Amino acid sequence: MSTRKRPTDATSSEFKEEDVFARIKVVGVGGSGCHAINRMISSRIKGVEFVAINTDAQDLHYCEAPVRVHIGQTTTRGLGAGSDPELGKKSAEENKEDVYNALKDADMVFITCGLGGGTGTGAAPIVAEIARELGALTVAVVTKPFSFEGLRRKKVAEEGLSELQPRVDTLITIPNDRLLQVIDKKTSLYDAFTVVDDVLRQGVQGISDLITMHGMINVDFADVKAIMQNAGSALMGIG
């Protein structure tokens, strides 16, 4: 499972875990991404570092990620992108250096967000560009909006998907409408979005656990990289 092993020291069997395992960073972009990050943290996913990126200062304040990057202080004044992807993009560009510093040294970067809004849709492609410039295997796990969220949001999501796909190694897209087929019809709106957060969590954890968890059949980072580097779109099965 090693990616950055230090030379063997014949006089000592001690090692630091961070020197041995791939460094994986999970980045939540925008409100939906930050909510998904909170879900992952509460689920105690091991072996990954969490980074939250948002234009909305209040929403970012309540995110539990240890590393939080407030983008677009000048562009949005901390009030969010108002469902405008162009503002999300400008905000990420405004704080490119901060994003760079948050992602550096990562071997693998997961980017998670909900497409259709302003920050996630606009900023995620910029975050992905930075991750790949740093040489990290870059995987996006994103959701497409429910139909009841409206045609405009759907159109914004499709445009955002087109911007994001060429900037990541692997893109996993989860259409929220598919979730309606597996949840109870009496499920509240709040609970429906909680299910969305959990599916994003499963998408990230399913891959990260392959690398970080010991099992009967071990898969190391090099194996995962060989499969996912420049892979394009991917499918995710749950259950």
Image (cartoon, rainbow, N blue to C red):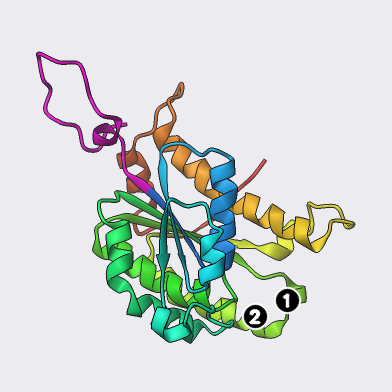
The x, y position of residue 108, in whole percent, is 34, 50
* Residue 106 left/right relative to 36: left
Is residue 18 part of the magenta span, yes or no?
A: yes
Q: Is 219 situated above or below 140?
A: above
Residue 198's label in the rendered image is none
* Mark 2 in CB contact with mark 1 (< 8 angstroms): yes
Q: Secondary structure at mark 1?
A: helix
Residue 153's label in the rendered image is 2
Residue 208 sits in quarter: top left
The disc labelled 2 sits on which kind of residue?
A: Arg
Q: Which residue is mark 1?
A: 149
| Between 90 and 167, the one nearer to me in the picture | 90
* Residue 213 left/right relative to 13: right
Is residue 203 part of the magenta span, yes or no?
A: no
Which residue of the protein is positioned furthest toward the right in this rendering?
186
Tell me the crowding category of disc 2: few under 14, some 14 to 19, or many 20 or more residues within 10 angstroms, Cα based: many
